[in-house]
Image (cartoon, grey):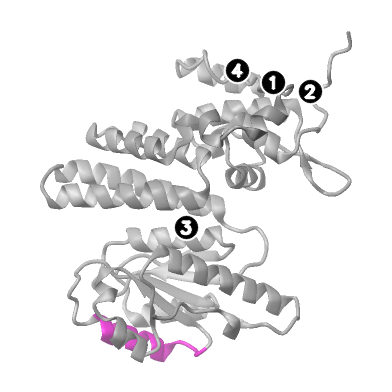
């Protein structure tokens, strides 16, 4: 009986996603940024993967889930990947054998959660919380990596990262976790968000959004989550960091030709200087550069901010919708169909 050539591209992405448990967004990012695999193309331009590609992706999945950085293992060959897994004590998993295909139609009809019960957001969140309480940075990083592989970017943000950071902050404020525990967890999440942003960064022209926090606001997780949200929608993102005065934010936006500035203001919640800072920022920026802000501190000044031309966004979902519309408007403008920045649909109060 003739054996099948494992190098022949034949599987569409939906099959590879099903077999590996990797989500499509992460799979594309691994290809684009790290050349983890190089799929072929059908006559219609659809990605096609070989058995060899699927085997390698399974090995990479297990290594990243064990805490390895994809940038350090993506270019290893199959033998090196298996050896690394054995050294990690995980030689019993990730041999790279793809799942059977005879029952593809049956599998397609089954609920995804039953195929990959380990990929539910609640299980990933629970694993992250357990690692946080154990003050185990490697376990927390591995749990976040597994969540990134098993969930869409939107679910990763909304169902894992936001509740994780919220719970950590709440436990710290109640004195139920020690400051050192909070610091260790925050450092891991910060590195993970940086990696996620790098992974999502576009490789084709895209509008630029600048993110950061205003002067006096040092808590930057809100702005980092905002950066991930808009990157998922196709924007290029420049993170200028926390606690910057209006003059510096405006100068950076002008230097980089930003189309939008998105800020986060969390603590102090009663900052009396925030409206003045944003008024100064709005004054220094061109009219066609939109300024938006979110966070509890901004909510207290929503009316005053609107009066000076800064839009308060109550949630990341509002930012997601706004950035999606903004990206589409930018794309239409580039394609010459007459739509421009003014076509962005801002959320309105009801």
Q: Are marks 4 and 3 in contact (CB under 8 Å)?
A: no
Q: Say which label, 1 or 3, has the lower sequence index.
A: 1
Please report the residue visible at 29 percent of the width from the left and 70 percent of the height from the top. 265
Boundaries of the magenta span: 274-287
Position of the C terminus, as image quadrant, is bottom left
Residue 237 falls within the magenta-colored stretch: no
Q: Say which label, 4 or 1, has the lower sequence index.
A: 4
Q: Is residue 222 above or below residue 283?
A: above
**Residue 317 tag number:** none
Helix, strand or loop status at disc 1: loop
Q: Are marks 4 and 1 in contact (CB under 8 Å)?
A: no
Report, in whole angstroms, how far the alpha carbon at label 3 lies from the one at label 2: 36 Å
Residue extending farthest to the left is 175
**Residue 6 tag number:** 2
Within 10 Å of disc 2 (Cα), the crowding (few <14, some 14-19, many 20+) is: some
Report, in whole angstroms, how far the alpha carbon at label 2 lies from the one at label 4: 15 Å
Q: Say which label, 2 or 1, has the lower sequence index.
A: 2
Residue 39 located left or right of residue 224: right
**Residue 228 tag number:** 3
Q: Nearer the viewer, mark 4 or mark 1?
A: 1
Please report the residue visible at 39 percent of the width from the left and 37 percent of the height from the top. 124
**Residue that numbered label 4 is attached to:** 95
Residue 284 falls within the magenta-colored stretch: yes
């Amino acid at each position: 009986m003739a054996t099948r050539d494992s190098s022949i591209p034949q599987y569409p992405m939906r099959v590879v996603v099903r077999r590996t448990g990797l989500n499509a967004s992460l799979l594309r990012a691994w290809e684009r940024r790290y050349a983890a695999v190089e799929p072929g193309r059908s006559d219609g331009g659809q990605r096609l993967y070989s058995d060899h590609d699927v085997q390698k992706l399974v090995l990479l999945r297990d290594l990243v889930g064990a805490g390895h950085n994809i940038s350090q293992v993506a270019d290893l060959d199959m033998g090196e990947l298996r050896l690394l897994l054995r050294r990690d004590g995980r030689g019993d998993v990730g041999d790279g054998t793809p799942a059977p295909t005879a029952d593809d139609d049956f599998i397609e009809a089954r609920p995804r959660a039953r195929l990959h019960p380990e990929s539910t957001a609640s299980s990933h969140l629970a694993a992250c919380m357990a690692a946080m309480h154990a003050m185990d940075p490697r376990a927390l990083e591995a749990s976040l990596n597994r969540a990134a592989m098993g969930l869409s970017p939107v679910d990763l943000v909304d169902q894992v990262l936001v509740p994780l950071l919220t719970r950590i902050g709440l436990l710290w404020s109640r004195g139920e976790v020690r400051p050192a525990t909070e610091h260790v967890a925050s450092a891991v999440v910060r590195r993970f968000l940086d990696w996620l942003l790098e992974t999502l960064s576009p490789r084709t022209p895209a509008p630029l959004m600048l993110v950061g926090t205003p002067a006096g606001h040092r808590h930057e997780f809100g702005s980092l989550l905002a950066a991930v949200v808009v990157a998922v929608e196709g924007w290029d993102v420049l993170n200028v960091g926390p606690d910057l005065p209006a003059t510096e934010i405006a100068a950076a936006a002008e230097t980089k030709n930003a189309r939008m500035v998105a800020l986060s203001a969390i603590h102090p919640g009663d900052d009396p200087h925030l409206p003045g800072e944003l008024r100064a920022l709005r004054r220094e920026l061109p009219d066609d550069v939109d300024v938006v802000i979110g966070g509890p501190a901004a909510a207290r000044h929503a009316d005053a901010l609107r009066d000076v031309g800064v839009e308060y966004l109550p949630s990341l979902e509002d930012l997601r919708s706004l950035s999606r519309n903004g990206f589409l408007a930018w794309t239409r403008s580039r394609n010459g169909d007459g739509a421009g920045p003014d076509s962005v649909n801002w959320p309105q109060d009801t």
